[in-house]
Image (tube, rainbow, N blue to C red):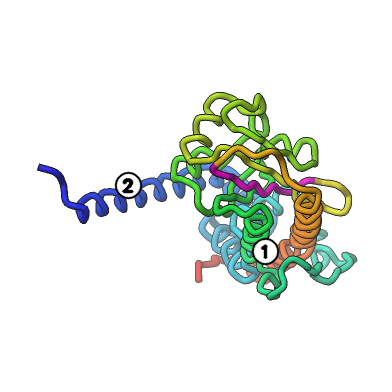
Amino acid sequence: MSESPGHEQHEAEEMEAMRAEVRHLRARLRAHPLISEAQGLLRERYGLPDAESAFALLQRASQQYNVKLRTLAGALTRAQRPDEREPLWFPRRARRAEPRLTFDGAGRARGGNRGAVLSAVLSQALAVVSSDMANVQTRDRAKGGLLLEKHTGLSADFVDFFSHVEEAGTACGLAAEKVAQITVEDVATDPVFTGPVRETILRAGSRACHSVPLTTAAGTCVGVVSVHLDRPIKGLTAAQTRTLDRVGAEAGEWLGWYDRTVVVDALEYLHALGRDHGGRRFRRS
């Protein structure tokens, strides 16, 4: 006797919930060593009595500026130690205005909202290439490789596989390495892919893809947006590549500004909190 459609749907929903939980656990495992290192720095620097206080301090700054905890922890561990005599961590830094995104005509990706900017990049790339499958990755500055941050139209297997990838054996990795747009006309035959990568992409229904680096004005790649198509292609038009060049340059410059401004604002706030609560317990809000 066959199972009812309702039962099958329930099983599918349970499976997707389990996959989401696994992805969440993997992300936590990747972030844990970095956050632990940041907690140790905060305890030593501000005389905090325990790791819980250090985490609460980090969490408060993360929430205040809407900066991911892992991003803030990474920035903390990389930044030069502040002068403890100074109330500001970066007293002489120059502030620059938020870069304008000309491809975001509605102006929804403003006000330092990183998630909204990445969503706008995804939407624009889909519109230019006329597809409904795409993903955005950013550089993992702590471990190297690329982190999947936004996606649409792609299978759960694809999202699991590409949650964090090294740069070798992928079109996105090649785009990041070459700092250039990469077109894969046929996923089934292109030599850029390693075997497991090719199989995962084909199972997701993608037969071609186009990857665009997100670059700063200095030419540094800070991320990649990749659009997938359900059929082989013969490449993009000159007009499409020009438009995607502009998207990649504007988005990359915005992400660079975000790291230099919003993330640094969060570090400044963290420093102020640490000075104010030095030596005392600090609890999560």
Q: 176 or 139, which is in the foreground?
A: 176
Amino acid at circle 1: Val
Q: Is residue 117 left or right of residue 242?
A: left
Q: In this view, does 88 lie above or below 234?
A: below
Residue 258 is inside the magenta segment: no
Number of numbered discs present?
A: 2
Q: Does the magenta stretch include residue 226?
A: yes
Which element type, helix, strand or loop, lies under badge 1?
helix
Q: Residue beneath label 1, please?
A: 117
CA gap, disc 1 and disc 2: 30 Å
Depth check: give the residue in front, 266 or 229: 229
Q: Mark 2 points at which residue?
A: 15
Is the stretch drawn in magenta largely helix, strand or loop? strand
Give, as a single range, the part of the protein colored magenta: 221-230
Considering depth in this image, is 15 or 240 the residue closer to the camera? 240
Q: In this view, does 204 lie above or below 75?
A: above
Q: How crowded is mark 1: few (under 14 residues within 10 Å), some or many (20 or more)?
A: many
Residue lying at 32% horizontally and 47% vertically, measured from the top left: 15
Q: Can residue 80 be seen in this view?
A: no
Residue type marked 2: Met
Q: Which badge, 1 or 2, comes first in the chain's sequence?
A: 2
Q: Is the residue 28 above or below the residue 198 in the image?
A: below
Q: Position of residue 231 (x, y in %)?
A: 56, 40
Q: 73 or 208, which is in the foreground?
A: 208
Residue 196 placed where, x, y %? Answer: 52, 27
- Residue at x 29% of width, y 51% of height: 14
Query: Which secondary structure lies at badge 2?
Result: helix
